[in-house]
Image (cartoon, rainbow, N blue to C red):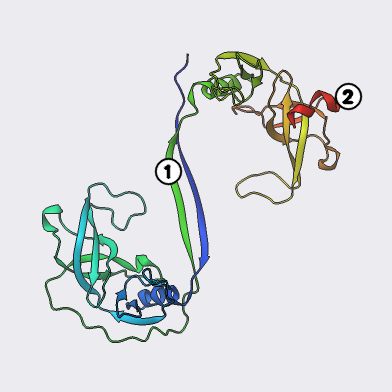
Amino acid sequence: MPEVLKAPLAVEFPFTRSVGPVQSAFLTGLRERVVLGVKTGDGRVLVPPVEYDPVTAEEIRDLVEVAPTGTVTTWAWNHEPRRGQPLDTPFAWVLVRLDGADTALLHALDAPGPDAVHTGMRVRVRWADERSGAITDIACFEPYDGEPAQPAGHSGKFTDAITGIVAPARLDYTYSPGRAQTAYIHALSERRTVGERCPSCRKVYVPPRGACPTCGVATSEQVEVGPRGTVTTYCIVNIKAKNLDIEVPYVYAHIALDGADLALHGRIGGIPYDQVRMGLRVEPVWTEGTRHPDHYRPTGEPDAEYDAYKELL
């Protein structure tokens, strides 16, 4: 049995969203080196500001400036900063209650080591050299032993206010396909397609998952299927995908390989998109150096009868 495969993967996309009037003022204030909170009906000042009181659910819009100095309420040391974190050297994550605020703001503290950090220590904002209206306009906090800074009493009204943000979302992880799919991928590198048969219902699943999705029992008996198959259903793609060098429109189809009891998906080529149909008989086209078929093309055989694939729709 070959070693089970694994590979690092990343899912990443930009998340674009609008901001309401309170968050707009907060982010624009950061761009202008002003920290704004919002005052609740009972006089509490919340930083970062929110649009609704978390206790009473009352809408709150009364903006108030707080000082860029404050007190650490709790902290944790980060020995190994990761990609995208505020600092690239070890630092402390801290909750800081800014002077004039009743809640704490989470950010990074630039300190020489964990022995230099303690609850109750005084800190101040270190502003980024270039600011765009984001939480990263605060580069980090730094230790401070001076007098509390005095806010100027900014009203929270700005020209050219921030109205939206783009927040990059990313998930890094290591993916392993497991025993069954490792065998499937190795077979593809030999231009073969291998599934596994359920010992109970005798159905052959491609790609295999190591267990029958119907019976819930483990599968281990390998069965080579295809290479030819039948288009069971399909869709016409009219929007070009980023970083995919395929001209639109093109057809993506579910294909039931001969001998399989589950349809897999693949692109259909070698035929005008508007001539693809259910029942079309197809075969794989391989590209040198790849581990899977580039696309499927018509074999020239007569179309399959509907009864032959209706259970695989």
Residue 72 x %, y %: 19, 64
Return the residue nearer the eye: 270 or 288: 270
Residue at (25% x, 69% y) in the render: 126
Residue 232 x %, y %: 77, 32
**As drawn, which residue projects farthest toward the right?**
302
Total marks in image? 2
Return the residue nearer the eye: 105 or 77: 105
Residue 275 sits in which quadrant?
top right
Circle number at residue 261: none
First in residue order: circle 2 vs circle 1: 1
Residue 151 x %, y %: 26, 83
Determine which residue is flagged by label 2. Answer: 302
Circle number at residue 172: 1
Query: Which residue type does callout 2 highlight?
Result: Pro
Return the residue nearer the eye: 302 or 218: 218
In this picture, is 278 found above or below 145?
Answer: above
Query: Which residue type does callout 1 highlight?
Result: Asp
Quick one: quadrant of the C terminus? top right
In this picture, is 312 found above or below 106?
Answer: above
Residue 138 sits in which quadrant?
bottom left
Residue at (68% x, 33% y) in the render: 265
- Rate crowding at label 1 as few (under 14), some (14 to 19) or many (20 or more) other CA atoms within 10 Å: few
Residue 53 sits in which quadrant?
bottom left
Rounded to the nearest whole Å, what is the CA distance between mark 2 and mark 1? 46 Å
For mark 2, give the secondary structure.
loop
Residue 109 x %, y %: 22, 61
- Rate crowding at label 2 as few (under 14), some (14 to 19) or many (20 or more) other CA atoms within 10 Å: few
**As drawn, which residue projects farthest toward the front?**
56
In this picture, is 226 found above or below 112?
Answer: above
Q: Is residue 61 rendered to the left or right of residue 253?
A: left
Q: Is residue 297 rendered to the left or right of residue 196?
A: right
